[in-house]
Amino acid sequence: EFLLRAQSAYQIGDYIRAEQYLNAVECKEENQWNYLMGMIMLKCEKYNEALSFLKKGWDHEPKTCAFALECCCRELEDYRGAYEYACLQRDLK
């Protein structure tokens, strides 16, 4: 239930509430949980945290994760990583 509420809060742009709901979820190692937490961290400009969560949540949504990971790497000035994720996006299409 908290995961669904977190998704709803994320979709309307309430990232703080979405993070609170995710923190209330018992199983925090699922791909979907990590993916959503990574996307929230990206929106909150916490790029190192986002990078970590998105790598763990890769299997839930690979295309979106590749784009988000590219953004994180670019913001962290890891241009090699950004290039690699951009190439992965192309391969996933």
Image: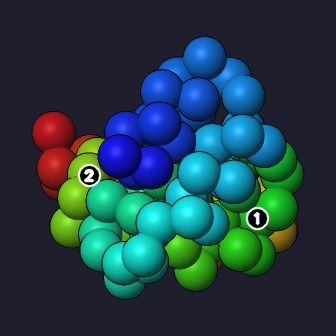
Q: At which x and y percent is residue 15?
A: 72, 38
Q: How is the image coloured?
A: rainbow
Q: At which x and y percent is residue 40?
A: 65, 49
**Residue 12 is drawn in which quadrant?**
top right
Q: At which x and y percent is residue 16?
A: 78, 43
Q: Name the side, left or right, on which 69 lies relative to 74.
A: left
Of residues 2 and 91, which is closer to you in this image? 2
Q: Name the side, left or right, on which 21 lies relative to 89.
A: right
- Identify whether 35 is placed above or below 67: below
Q: Amino acid at mark 1?
A: Tyr
For the point 69% across and 54% down, which residue is it?
A: 20
For the point 58% across and 29% down, which residue is it?
A: 9
Q: Name the side, left or right, on which 6 lies relative to 16.
A: left
Instruction: Please give the label number shown on residue 47.
Output: 1
Instruction: Please give the label number shown on residue 61.
Output: 2
As helix, strand or loop, the secondary structure at mark 1 comes to helix
**Residue 56 is drawn in which quadrant?**
bottom left
- Identify whether 86 is placed above or below 4: below
Q: Amino acid at mark 2?
A: Glu
Compute the Cα span from label 2 to label 1.
18 Å
| Number of disc labels | 2
Q: Is residue 22 visible?
A: yes
Q: Is residue 70 visible?
A: no
Q: Residues within 10 Å of mark 1 (few under 14, many from 20)?
A: many
For the point 51% across and 42% down, which residue is it?
A: 6
The quarter of the image holding the C terminus is top left
For the point 29% across and 69% down, which residue is it?
A: 31
Please report whichever mark, 2 or 1, sits nearer to the chain's N-terminal start: 1
Of residues 36 and 21, which is closer to you in this image? 21
As helix, strand or loop, the secondary structure at mark 2 comes to loop
Instruction: For the residues labelled 2 and 1, say whether their Cβ atoms are less than 8 Å apart.
Output: no
